[in-house]
């Protein structure tokens, strides 16, 4: 499927807005997508797409932190599940996320996701995605756009005018003396892209796993899924961290040991937490922010 790419973002605001925008983009990139460059750029592209659409806040930080004052209902999960206080990027990871954010703020486009405005991880199936077009898959994230006029390229015409809010919660991540990629001016990574909605969980299994039998996890998942055409199996070797329902608490997301996802008509996709269970093939690893 060929997607028309989004137009390059046109940033026309002062250095204070730029610094705050890069901080917010870098935080979304790192906490939502982990360390890999394509994943981070895909998430940043969704944020920039939203800023240009009238259905969302008109600032970058406003988009990223929409609903963050609520326990549930935040648009980007890391803003309300405690991740900012619980997980911190290394200086290098934060610098990389900021460099990628700056590149895209200055006009780089991630064409893989087109004008997607929503996404979620492959092991979550929120009800809103049934009413949207799936546009792309980037590693463990699926990207979506609205059907009809709301998803038409003409709907992304709002001009960015700055006015970024000052978010104290990002202050500990950013420090002076860091620079925008390609400039010499000082400037300071869901269920994702939408709140993970509570839903009927007939195809979802949240399981405590034996820590000494990782090779058996796919078989356990297949047995539990049985003949279900769609199935999601998420396991933890630490029973104290196992979630009991959606949305998954942040501490549970951080400690997932294994996932298995089956879609109708496709083979099941098994992935391990490779910091806990090293795998020879990188594509069998769950993506991690830390």
Image (tube, rainbow, N blue to C red):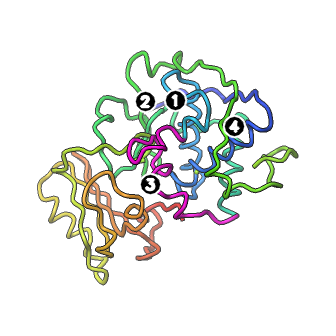
In the rendered structure, find residue 145 and report the number of the disc placed on it.
Answer: 2
In the rendered structure, find residue 105 and report the number of the disc placed on it.
Answer: 4
The residue mark sitting in front, 2 or 3, is: 3
Q: Residue 59, relative to residue 150: is it above or below?
A: below
**Mark 3 crowd level (few <14, some 14–19, many ≥20, 10 Å Cα):** many
In the rendered structure, find residue 81 and report the number of the disc placed on it.
Answer: 3
Q: Which residues are magenta?
A: 65-91
Residue at image x 54%, y 61%?
85
For mark 4, give the secondary structure.
Answer: helix
Q: CA distance from mark 4 to mark 1?
A: 15 Å
Q: Earlier in the sequence, mark 3 or mark 4?
A: 3
Q: Considering depth in this image, is 108 or 265 the residue closer to the camera?
A: 108
For mark 1, give the secondary structure.
Answer: loop
Residue found farthest to the right: 184
Quadrant, the C terminus = bottom right
| Marks 1,2: beta carbons within 8 A | yes
Q: CA distance from mark 3 to mark 4?
A: 26 Å
Quadrant, the N terminus = top left
């Amino acid at each position: 499927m060929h997607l028309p790419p989004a137009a390059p973002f046109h940033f026309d605001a002062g250095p204070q807005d730029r610094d705050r925008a890069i901080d917010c983009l870098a935080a979304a990139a790192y906490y939502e997508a982990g360390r890999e460059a394509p994943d981070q750029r895909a998430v940043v592209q969704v944020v920039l797409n939203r800023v240009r659409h009238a259905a969302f806040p008109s600032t970058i930080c406003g988009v990223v932190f929409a609903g963050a004052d609520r326990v549930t209902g935040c648009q980007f999960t890391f803003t309300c599940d405690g991740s900012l206080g619980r997980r911190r990027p290394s200086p290098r990871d934060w610098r990389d996320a900021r460099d990628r954010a700056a590149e895209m703020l200055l006009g780089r486009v991630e064409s893989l996701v087109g004008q997607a405005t929503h996404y979620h991880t492959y092991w979550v199936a929120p009800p809103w995605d049934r009413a949207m077009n799936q546009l792309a898959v980037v590693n463990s994230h699926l990207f979506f756009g609205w059907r009809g006029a709301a998803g038409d390229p003409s709907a992304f015409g709002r001009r960015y005018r700055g006015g970024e809010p000052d978010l104290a919660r990002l202050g500990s991540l950013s420090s002076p003396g860091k620079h925008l990629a390609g400039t010499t001016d000082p400037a300071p990574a869901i269920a994702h892209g939408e709140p993970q909605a509570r839903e009927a969980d007939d195809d979802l299994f949240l399981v405590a796993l034996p820590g000494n039998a990782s090779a058996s996890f796919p078989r356990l998942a297949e047995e539990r899924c049985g003949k279900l055409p769609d199935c999601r199996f998420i396991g933890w070797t630490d029973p104290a961290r196992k979630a009991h329902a959606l949305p998954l608490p942040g501490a549970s997301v951080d400690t997932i040991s294994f996932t298995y996802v089956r879609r109708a008509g496709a083979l099941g996709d098994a992935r391990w937490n490779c910091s806990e269970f090293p795998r020879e093939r990188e594509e069998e690893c769950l993506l991690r922010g830390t």
